[in-house]
């Protein structure tokens, strides 16, 4: 088998080196004709398709192109011309015909495989380029997603800051509103207190005016009567003022445990003064009634 394979290689190498540019060279043509005549006598070589195909598959591109030219795949069929000119009998020409078919079939098979391989390689290349483009697009999308994620995080932080600022502003606004309401309430309360005091003082002035209007002569009885009424009225005015301040405490102070306290010394002075005026007035009235009438 190894000897046949070497013989096939030698025969094909001679065909590959056939000078197409010098086809009228008689010496070369005689050598080729003699080789083909001897080839037709070797049935084992002509019909050994496996060795022929293996040899053709192992040729380089240049030798393969020259072989196709010699066997008429891409130009004039020189092998058939030499085969037809051979003096061999029918069996020898049949062997040459088998050899020609095996060579041509192997060439077509190699071309087909190369075309498929070329197409596959081209498809692989295109697929690789597409995958690279897809990978590049994926990287771009990933970068974009990461950028969007960063923007979302920044927006969340900004929203948090805005929410915090809004909360602070709301708290300050509520505090300001509470202060305004407190000031307004205190103002209304103070205005009410002074209004009540004004009416009380006006009433006291009117009472004293009516009392003094009836006093035409300043006797001890009249003076005592005025002092008694003044002492009682002083105590009543102080009680009214205490009532107003305690009421203000109930309205404006939210601490239920806090109790409003008046100055004990001042309260004691008011009580003593009022009591002294009443007692002194009663004494004057009594003196007037006992000793002067």
Image: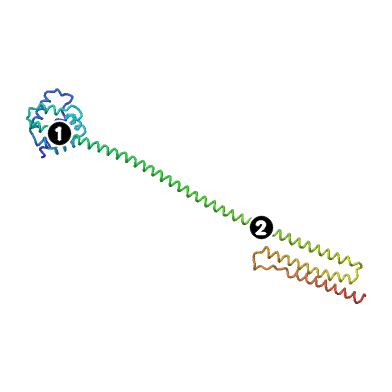
Check disc 1 and report the residue beneath it.
101
Foreground: 121 or 291? 121
Residue 246 percent across, percent down from the top left: 71, 66
Q: Secondary structure at mark 2?
A: helix
Query: Badge 2: how crowded within 10 Å, few (<14), some, or many (20+)?
Result: few
Quadrant in the rendering for residue 71: top left
Q: Is residue 47 left or right of residue 278?
A: left
Q: Against 46, is 158 above or below?
A: below
* Quadrant of the frame with the N terminus: top left
Q: Looking at the image, which residue is at 27% across and 37% down?
A: 119
Check disc 2 and report the residue beneath it.
181
Total numbered circles: 2
* Quadrant of the frame with the C terminus: bottom right
Residue farthest along the bottom direction in this orientation: 290
Q: Against 261, is 144 above or below?
A: above
Q: Looking at the image, which residue is at 59% across and 54% down?
A: 170
Residue 108 percent across, percent down from the top left: 20, 34
Q: Against 274, is 113 above or below?
A: above
Q: Secondary structure at mark 1?
A: helix
Quadrant in the rendering for residue 241: bottom right
Residue 257 percent across, percent down from the top left: 64, 68
Residue farthest along the right direction in this orientation: 293
Q: Looking at the image, which residue is at 14% across and 28% down?
A: 80
Q: Is residue 169 left or right of residue 67?
A: right
């Amino acid at each position: 088998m190894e000897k046949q394979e070497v013989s096939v290689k030698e025969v094909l190498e001679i065909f590959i080196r056939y000078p197409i540019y010098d086809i009228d060279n008689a010496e070369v043509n005689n050598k080729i004709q003699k080789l083909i005549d001897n080839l037709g006598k070797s049935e084992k070589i002509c019909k050994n398709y496996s060795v022929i195909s293996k040899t053709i598959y192992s040729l380089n591109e240049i030798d393969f192109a020259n072989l196709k030219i010699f066997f008429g795949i891409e130009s004039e069929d020189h092998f058939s011309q030499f085969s037809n000119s051979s003096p061999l009998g029918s069996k020898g020409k049949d062997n040459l015909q088998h050899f020609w078919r095996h060579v041509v079939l192997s060439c077509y098979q190699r071309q087909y495989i190369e075309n498929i391989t070329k197409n596959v390689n081209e498809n692989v290349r295109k697929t690789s380029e597409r995958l690279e483009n897809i990978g590049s697009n994926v990287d771009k999308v990933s970068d974009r997603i990461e950028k969007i994620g960063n923007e979302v995080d920044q927006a969340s932080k900004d929203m948090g800051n805005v929410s915090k600022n809004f909360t602070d502003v709301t708290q300050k606004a509520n505090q300001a509103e509470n202060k305004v309401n407190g000031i307004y309430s205190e103002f209304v309360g103070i205005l009410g207190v002074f209004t009540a005091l004004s009416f009380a003082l006006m009433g006291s002035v009117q009472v004293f005016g009516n009392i003094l209007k009836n006093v035409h002569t300043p006797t001890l009885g009249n003076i005592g009567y005025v002092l008694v009424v003044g002492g009682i009225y002083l105590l009543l005015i102080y009680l009214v003022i205490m009532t107003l301040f305690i009421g203000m405490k109930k309205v404006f102070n939210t601490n239920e445990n806090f109790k409003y306290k008046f100055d004990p010394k001042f309260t004691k002075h008011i009580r003593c003064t009022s009591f002294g005026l009443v007692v002194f007035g009663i004494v004057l009235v009594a003196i007037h009634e006992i000793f002067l009438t």
